[in-house]
Every structure is written in C-alpha cells, then in structure tokens.
Image (spheres, coloured by chain):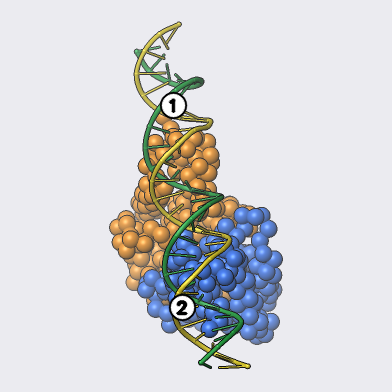
Chain colours: A orange, B blue, C green, D yellow
Amino acid sequence: MAVDRDHVLRSAAALLTRKSTATMDEVAKAAGISRATLHRQFAGRDALVRALESLGIAECEAALDGARLDEGSASDAVRRLVREIEPAAALLAFLYTENQLFEGGQQNEGWTRIDDRVAALFRRGQAAGEFRIDLTPAWLTEALYGLLASGAWAVSEGRVASKDFNFMIVELLLGGAVRREEP
Amino acid sequence: MAVDRDHVLRSAAALLTRKSTATMDEVAKAAGISRATLHRQFAGRDALVRALESLGIAECEAALDGARLDEGSASDAVRRLVREIEPAAALLAFLYTENQLFEGGQQNEGWTRIDDRVAALFRRGQAAGEFRIDLTPAWLTEALYGLLASGAWAVSEGRVASKDFNFMIVELLLGGAVRREEP
DNA sequence: TCCATGTGAGACATATTTGTCTCATTCGGT
DNA sequence: ACCGAATGAGACAAATATGTCTCACATGGA
C-alpha cells in the first residue's frame, strides 16, 4: 500500500518537463494518487523539486559510474555515458531548465561534482589528442547537457525516434554535422 | 513619455530567462516601470508572453533573411545564421523552454516556418554532399536550437565568454568534438 | 502658463494555489 | 475475518498573483 515514491517522482518529472507550471494537483493526478497523499510524501512543491533534483543527481552519478569514464578512448567513454544517461534524460531536461534551483545563489554541490567529472572526461580526450583543444571542456560539458535536453524534448515531441536518441546525440557531439572524408 | 515597448520586452525576456516564474510586478520593476503601466501595455501575463513570442519569431526571421541561407556553402550559411541570431539568443532560449506555449496543441505557425527554413538549409548541405546524411535535418535543427539555448545560458552564467559564443556553437555543431586529421 | 495625456502608487476584489485538517474507506498483514 | 495503517475526497484558511480601479503627480506641447 505504500506509495511508490520512485513512480511518483518519475511521473512528476515527465509532467513537469512538459508543463513546468503544473500544480500539485496535476502532479498528483499524473501519478495516479491524491493531492493529500502527494503532500504526505513531499512537504510541498519545493520539497518535490528538491527530491527530483536529488534523484537526477543520483542517476547522473550512477550513469557516470556505469560509463567507466577512465577506460578506453574518450570517444567510447562519451558513447557509454550517453547510453547510460538516456533513461534519465527527460528528468535531466527538466532540471536543466529549472533554473530556479540556482536562485538561492548556491547550487547543489552534486552538480559541481558531476560537471567536474564530465569536464575531466573531455579534458582527458584533449590531452590524448583525441578531442580538439579549441573547444573548452566547460563548453563541451554544457553542450552535452543541452543536446541531452534537446534530444529528450525532440523525442517527447515525436520529432526524433526514441531509438535514434543515442546515435543523434553522440554523433553530433563527437562528429558534428560536416561530412568527413573517408579515412 | 511613451513607454519604450521594445525595452520592456527585452527586459522581460532577460528576467524571464533567468526566472521563468517572475511575477508581473518583478517584470515591471525590471523594466523600470510600474505594474500599472506594464498592464496598460500588455493586457496580462499571457499577452506579454505572446508579445515575446512574436518578437522572437520576428527576430528569427530577420536573422534568417540576413543570413542569406541560399548563398555559398551550407557551412558558411550556418555560420552567418548563428552570427545573425546571436543577439536574440537569450530571448530564444526563454521561448525554447517556455513549452507552455504549445500547451494549446497548436503552436504559432511562425515557428513552423522557421523550422522549415532551417531544416531546408541542412537539407541543402546534405544534398551538396557537405553535411552527413545520417543525421536528420529535423534533428540538426533541434540541435541548433539546443546549442543556442545552452550557449546563451552558459554565457549568462559566466561559464563561457560572450565573445566565444559564435565560435563555440558553430564549431561544435559543424565539426564536433573529435579532432580532425590535417587535410 | 495651462491643459491633456501618460505614469506611479496603492487600494481592492477575485482567482488560483497551497498547506492543513477531518473523516470515511480500502488495503494488507496477522 | 479482523485490525491497524495508509489512502482518497473534500472542506477550510492563508498566501500569492492577477486584473481593475482611483487619484495625485509630472511631463510635454499648445
């Protein structure tokens, strides 16, 4: 009978990604529970968003762990990372645009840890001569987030097929739009 | 004495990009006018957002015109487009995440026109053998929007220098992160 | 100078959302 | 089958945002 907290969070993420101003009542309905029960789980809208943020951070870090960023080529590590992070992409897209989280001035330190790990991956690729050095690791990190968000958005709008999510993001991020000469 | 409508819209865009839930009072203060005057210009929050949307569409179409997408190589056209669109990037970033505009089901047809023109550019590049064909024009269009938004966001957060905005976006979109062999 | 128009400040009612509470019902374990 | 715990439905007040109105003030032109 216990409420499936994870299910509630995912429903909320899915809804809030589409409509960031959804009310607590709409969030509750989307999760198939009553507003009262939702409020028993999360003290308020703030607590709900914070919980979503924690979930997002946890999933990101799990993806980072699962992608084994230190192994093999940096390109392959990026591919693994995107693959691992795909299930959380919609949630990430919501949090990425929920800039209100940073209003307080101090953002959750979890994001800095994640930023650092991703940036370190790009830096490793640069040091290995694999990635170009005229694009900063900070920008590559930011671009990855942006493409993940765009990809999640495009999939949810039906503009890109879900099965192409990985390919599109990785290929654009790594290879760009310009056609390469055959090696 | 007449209120500078354009100034109000730009202030609103700048504020709402940072805090999408800002109240009408905050929007008014940001523009340096009173809530009453703001309300005389825009009947309500809805009307304000619609006006921002119209402004965004107009600036996008102006950028598309100014970039002369049909001339020269598709890559150069993309470079011109990003350069022309940069001043409107913050506004575009706001509108891009203001998905509530599409809640009604029918989005402003202006966006479809713009999407079509951008997608046509990528399609032209593909037909010319300049762009790879395994990334759909729809995705390239979406990715451009995402990178513009990420770039505007990164600049406003100080993570990327404003002067690098163009370079970073264009180079990543066209060339990707992987280093190319010297030709 | 005088008048008309636009503006700022604030009061006010309304609508919406939120947080809290109660109570009947239902579910699950013993 | 029974009992405790959790849930759903709804009432309620408080907080917040919005839309509307009035009135005093200032600004700019005739």
What amino acid is at disc 2?
Phe
Residue at image point 63% right, 76% down? B58
Where residue B127 appears, as percent x and y from the top left, is 69, 73
Residue at image point 42% right, 79% down? B162
Q: Is mark 2 on a helix, strand or loop?
A: helix
Q: Is residue A54 visible?
A: yes
Name which quarter of the figure residue D12 lies in: top left
Residue hosting label 2: B165
- Measure the C-alpha gap from mark 2 to mark 1: 52 Å
What amino acid is at disc 1?
Met
Where residue A28 appears, as percent x and y from the top left, is 49, 40
Residue A1 is marked as 1
Q: How crowded is mark 2: few (under 14 residues within 10 Å), some or many (20 or more)?
A: many
Where residue A18 appears, as percent x and y from the top left, is 55, 53
Protein chain holding label 1: A
Name which quarter of the figure residue A167 lies in: bottom right
Q: Is mark 1 on a helix, strand or loop?
A: loop
Seen from the viewer's position, the closer of residues D9 and D21 is: D21
Seen from the viewer's position, the closer of residues B2 and B131 is: B2
Residue at image point 49% right, 35% down? A34
Is residue B31 depicted above or below A1 in this figure? below
The mark lying in front, picked from 2 and 1, is 1
Protein chain holding label 2: B
On the picture, is A62 further left or further right than A183?
left
Is residue A103 depicted above or below A15 in this figure? below
